[in-house]
Amino acid sequence: NAGVIQTPRHKVTGKGQEATLWCEPISGHSAVFWYRQTIVQGLEFLTYFRNQAPIDDSGMPKERFSAQMPNQSHSTLKIQSTQPQDSAVYLCASSLVGGNTGQLYFGEGSKLTVL
Amino acid sequence: AQKVTQTQTSISVVEKTTVTMDCVYETRDSSYFLFWYKQTASGEIVFLIRQDSYKKENATVGHYSLNFQKPKSSIGLIITATQIEDSAVYFCAMRDNSAGNKLTFGIGTRVLVRP
C-alpha cells in the first residue's frame, strides 16, 4: 500500500517567489493535515481538512499561506511571496475519521529553502 | 489550549539497555489520546504506540511500553532491549476533544543508541 505522497521532496525558491507543495493522502483516509517542522519550533500544526472541507486552519499564517483540497486524493499548500523564515520541512499527514483515535500517517515531507 | 512538553533534549544509551523518555501534557478535557512517534534520520515519522486516557493499563507494543501517570499528566515512553536502529527523535503527541482530530506535538527527544 502506498503511503502519503508528497511532492516535491526539495524546493528552493528565491525570496518573493511562490511555492506550491502537493500531497496525496492514503486512499480511504478522509482527514488530511499539514504540519511545518523547524529546528526551533518543532512540529507545528498548520491546517486540517476532513472530507475535503477545511476544518481548522488555526495554525496557518494569516498572510501568504493558503491550502486547498480540490478532491479526495489531492491537497496543496501554497506560499506566496516566500520569505527566508518560511524555510522548513512541510509535512502532510492523513488519517481515518470516525473510529480512529487520531493516529496520523505522515509523508516524507517537502523541504522548502527560501534564499 | 493543549500543550505537550518534553524536557529531555537528548539521551545516549548503550545497545541492549533500556531508555526512558519523559513527556507531560496539559489538557482541560477528561478524554484524550496520547501518542509517541519516531522520526528516523531519513525524516520519516512513524507511529509507535498510543494510550487512551480512560484506560488504566499501560500500553505495550513490542519493545515499546508506556508509563501513564494520569494524576501527574505524564506519559513516559520506555524502550527495552534497545537496538542501534532505535536511534531517532521521539515525539510525544496528544489529541483531545477540543482539538478535533489534530495532534499537538512535543519538541522531541533525540535518542542515540551506541554499540
Image (tube, rainbow, N blue to C red):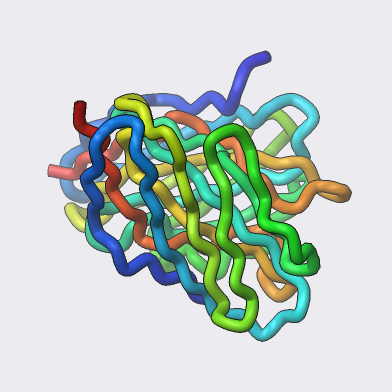
User: Going by the image, does B26 lie left or right of A11?
Assistant: right
Q: In this view, does A66 lie above or below A25?
A: below
Q: In this view, does A13 lie above or below B70?
A: above
Q: In this view, does B38 lie above or below A48?
A: above
Q: Which residue is drawn at 19% across and 44% down?
A: A114
Give residue B7's position: percent from left, percent from top: 32, 68
Q: Nearer the viewer, residue A40 or B49?
A: B49
Q: How many marks?
A: 0
Q: In which quarter of the image is the N terminus of chain A?
A: top right
Q: In which quarter of the image is the C terminus of chain A?
A: top left
Give residue B15's position: percent from left, percent from top: 29, 31
Question: Which residue lies most toward the right here?
Answer: A99
**Residue A69 picture quarter:** top right
Q: Can residue B90 be seen in this view?
A: yes
**Residue A62 picture quarter:** bottom left
Question: Which residue lies most toward the top here?
Answer: A1
**Residue B67 picture quarter:** bottom right
User: Going by the image, does A93 lie left or right of A16?
Assistant: right
User: Going by the image, does A14 lie left or right of A35?
Assistant: left
User: Going by the image, does A92 lie left or right of A95?
Assistant: left
Q: Which residue is drawn at 43% across and 56% down?
A: A65
